[in-house]
Image (tube, helix red, strand yellow):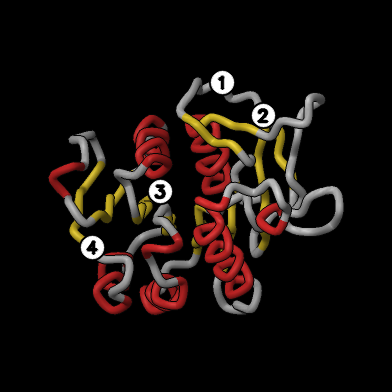
């Protein structure tokens, strides 16, 4: 596939880039600083701004899919969604957050008392992004929420997938490595199972 990856040098974006390269996909890595994109076969670095809808649409044009791996507080969902639609790209996957996932009480994780205040603004913006996507009728989108804790780790290929509910293990922990998250995201690109839906991942 020919994939446009917005935010390809970030914490999660860099893992997605590595996974796409590993599987032989052609990638346009759209970042603010193209010189930071590691040289790899099939990767073209492109300077782009997630806030500039028209310029971003031009960069996305001609790709089979677009993946957005940018911070919600540093981007504009209206601009991102508008750019994808204007570009004609048919498949759009958003690296989501865990904050909008439902917990046992039926409330969102971000609204629980134990949610870290430092991440609340980002989580709330992520929830707004998901709400906007759910109103889209013409875009084949997927919003992929990680576990509550996502950290650098092993690429194991062993994990569980779910829907709108936060996944936890027997101890009540919710975690995933960024490497395994990237596996599941590229799996979804290659064989879509969550079109126009949100899904999540955890061990």
- Name the secondary structure under disc 4: loop
**Separation (CA) of disc 4 from disc 3:** 21 Å
Residue holding disc 3 = 1
Ranked by sequence position, the earlier of labels 4 and 3 is: 3
- Name the secondary structure under disc 3: loop
- Horizontal arrangement in the rendering, residue 193 relative to residue 141 (left or right): right
Rendered image: mark on residue 44: none
Q: Nearer the viewer, residue 131 or 161?
A: 131
**Separation (CA) of disc 4 from disc 1:** 32 Å
Q: Nearer the viewer, residue 10 or 87?
A: 10
**Separation (CA) of disc 2 from disc 1:** 8 Å
* Crowding at mark 1 (Cα within 10 Å: few <14, some 14-19, many 20+): few
- Name the secondary structure under disc 1: loop
Rendered image: mark on residue 156: 1
Horizontal and vertical percent for residue 68? 43, 57
The image quadrant where one finds the C terminus is: top right
Ranked by sequence position, the earlier of labels 1 and 3 is: 3
Relative height, residue 148 to residue 87 (above, below): above
Rendered image: mark on residue 159: 2
Horizontal and vertical percent for residue 115? 64, 49
- Horizontal arrangement in the rendering, residue 157 relative to residue 13 (left or right): right
Residue visible at 50% across and 42% down in the picture: 186
**Separation (CA) of disc 4 from disc 2:** 33 Å
CB atoms of marks 4 and 3 within 8 Å: no
Q: Is residue 70 visible?
A: yes
> Which of pointers 2 and 3 indicates the residue nearer the eye?
2
- Name the secondary structure under disc 2: loop
Residue holding disc 4 = 48
């Amino acid at each position: 596939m020919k994939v446009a990856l917005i935010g390809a040098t970030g914490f999660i974006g860099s893992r997605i880039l590595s996974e796409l390269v590993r599987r032989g996909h052609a990638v346009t890595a759209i970042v603010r600083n193209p010189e930071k994109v590691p040289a790899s076969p099939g990767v073209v670095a492109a300077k782009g701004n997630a806030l500039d809808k028209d310029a971003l649409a031009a960069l996305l044009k001609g790709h089979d899919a677009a993946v957005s791996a940018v911070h919600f507080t540093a981007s504009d969902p209206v601009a991102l969604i508008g750019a994808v639609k204007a570009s004609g790209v048919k498949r759009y996957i958003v690296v989501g957050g865990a904050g909008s996932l439902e917990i046992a009480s039926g409330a969102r994780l971000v609204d629980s008392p134990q949610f870290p205040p430092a991440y609340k603004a980002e989580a709330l913006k992520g929830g707004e992004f998901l709400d906007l996507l759910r109103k889209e009728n013409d875009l084949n989108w997927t919003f992929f929420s990680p576990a509550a804790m996502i950290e650098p780790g092993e690429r194991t290929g062993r994990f569980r997938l779910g829907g709108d509910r936060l996944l936890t293990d027997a101890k009540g922990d919710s975690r995933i490595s960024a490497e395994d998250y990237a596996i599941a995201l590229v799996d979804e690109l290659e064989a879509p199972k969550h079109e126009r839906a949100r899904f999540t991942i955890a061990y």
